[in-house]
Image (tube, rainbow, N blue to C red):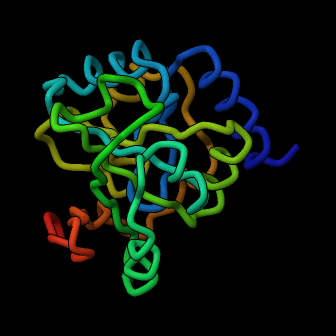
């Protein structure tokens, strides 16, 4: 069995048990869990030593999945995303169906639609959204590739993906935009 498929199987087992995974995303290496499991989300906050009032990003595989987790999304967002060059996380109003500790107190949620094959395949097979947050202690530098992930993080997850561990292509965190009611985007992180 190739490493890609083996990693998918192990990730699915961990996610179904409410465990944490360390995996390559469409941007940087991330810590992930089932985005509908509040206890799993709590483990990420603890591992990262992150304030639970700070938001985490949710990854989805398809545009249509957005309809399950956001009330009345403005469909113009899809046209906007087609114009972006790098992976872009969008902050949406009206989050639903996700773990309560993933939804900001104002009812918003940060979601990114992924194109990267591993993430997309994993999410489609899991049939639920997955949390993605940088694989670092809160406030420290985000790891661009696996070798930069600290031992604290590596030891704190339940499964570490083998796929792309040797990849040293520089990666950056996603852009973050807030989608406004008038159909415009406010750039939060370019």
Quadrant location of the N terminus?
Answer: top right
Q: Quick check: 159 above or below 29?
A: above
Q: Is residue 120 left or right of residue 170?
A: right
Residue displayed at 27% across by 67% down? 175
Q: Name the spot of residue 151 as percent of width and height, x first.
A: 34, 28
Q: Farthest residue in the right direction?
A: 1
Q: Quick check: 22 above or below 184?
A: above
Q: Quadrant of residue 17?
A: top right
Quadrant location of the C terminus?
Answer: bottom left
Q: Name the spot of residue 60 as percent of width and height, x first.
A: 53, 51
Q: Nearer the viewer, residue 141 or 107?
A: 107
Q: Quadrant of residue 137?
A: top left
Q: Quick check: 74 above or below 146?
A: below
Q: Nearer the viewer, residue 42 or 139?
A: 42
Q: Quick check: 7 above or below 115?
A: above
Q: Quadrant of residue 88?
A: bottom left
Q: Name the spot of residue 46 as percent of width and height, x first.
A: 26, 17
Q: Nearer the viewer, residue 151 or 117?
A: 117
Question: Can see residue 87?
Answer: yes
Q: Name the spot of residue 28 as percent of width and height, x first.
A: 38, 55
């Amino acid at each position: 069995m190739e490493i890609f498929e083996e990693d998918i199987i192990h990730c699915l087992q961990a996610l179904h048990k409410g465990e944490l995974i360390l995996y390559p995303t469409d941007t940087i290496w991330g810590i992930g869990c089932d985005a509908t499991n509040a206890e799993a989300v709590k483990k990420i906050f603890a591992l990262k030593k992150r304030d639970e009032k700070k938001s985490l990003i949710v990854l989805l595989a398809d545009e249509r999945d957005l309809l399950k987790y956001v009330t009345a999304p403005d469909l113009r967002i899809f046209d906007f995303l087609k114009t972006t060059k790098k992976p872009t996380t969008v902050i949406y109003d009206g989050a639903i169906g996700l773990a309560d500790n993933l939804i900001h107190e104002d009812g918003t949620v940060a979601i990114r639609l992924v194109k990267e094959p591993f993430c997309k395949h994993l999410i489609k097979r899991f049939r639920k959204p997955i949390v993605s947050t940088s694989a670092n202690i809160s406030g420290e530098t985000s790891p661009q590739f696996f070798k930069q992930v600290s031992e604290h993080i590596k030891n704190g997850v339940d499964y570490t993906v083998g796929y792309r561990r040797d990849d040293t292509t520089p990666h950056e965190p996603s852009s973050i935009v807030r989608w406004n009611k008038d159909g415009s985007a406010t750039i939060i992180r370019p």
